[in-house]
Image (spheres, rainbow, N blue to C red):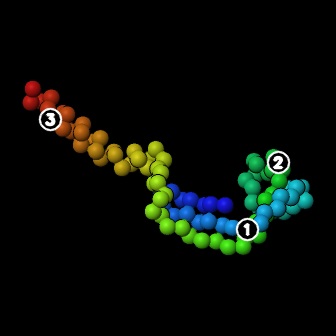
Amino acid sequence: MFAIPYPHRTRLKILGHARVEDARQHPELVAKLAEAEARPIVERLFFVDVVAFDWNCPKYITPRYIAAEVEAVIAPLRQRSAELEAQLKTKH
């Protein structure tokens, strides 16, 4: 199993043995782990007995961003572009 928080360019590799059990046999875990609106539809729980884990090198992890993160970075550029376009209009 891999857990990859792309903005941080890290990757946790987890090796283990998984077993699947009926969620009805573990109502206390469903109540503890699932959001209230999801609890009625939880059918199975996955248990992983971790054997080993490793943090991998970020060299080959492509950064990925959500639209809001990209917009926050380019907002000043958009503002500056609008200012320059306004200046050009006043000169012509």
Q: Is residue 18 visible?
A: yes
Q: Secondary structure at mark 2?
A: helix
The residue labelled by disc 2 is 40
- Residue under the point 21% across and 39% down: 83
- The residue at the point 47 percent across, 64 percent down is 58
Circle nearer the N terminus (3, 1): 1
Q: Nearer the viewer, residue 86 or 14?
A: 14
Q: Earlier in the sequence, mark 3 or mark 2?
A: 2
Q: Is residue 65 above or below residue 14?
A: above
Q: Quadrant of residue 75?
A: top left
**Residue holding disc 3:** 87
- Which residue of the protein is positioned furthest toward the left in this rendering? 91
Q: CA distance from mark 1 to mark 2?
A: 28 Å
Dot 1 or dot 2, earlier in sequence: 1
Residue in the foreground of this view, choosing between 83 and 16: 16
> Height in image: 84 above or below 38?
above
Q: Name the amino acid, label 1.
A: Gly
Q: Position of residue 68 (x, y in %)?
A: 45, 46
Residue at 51 percent of width and 64 percent of height: 10
Residue occupying the far bottom of the picture: 52
Q: Amino acid at mark 3?
A: Gln
The one of 10 and 29 positioned closer to us in this rendering: 10
Question: For numbered disc 1, what is the local secondary structure?
Answer: strand
Residue position for label 1 = 16
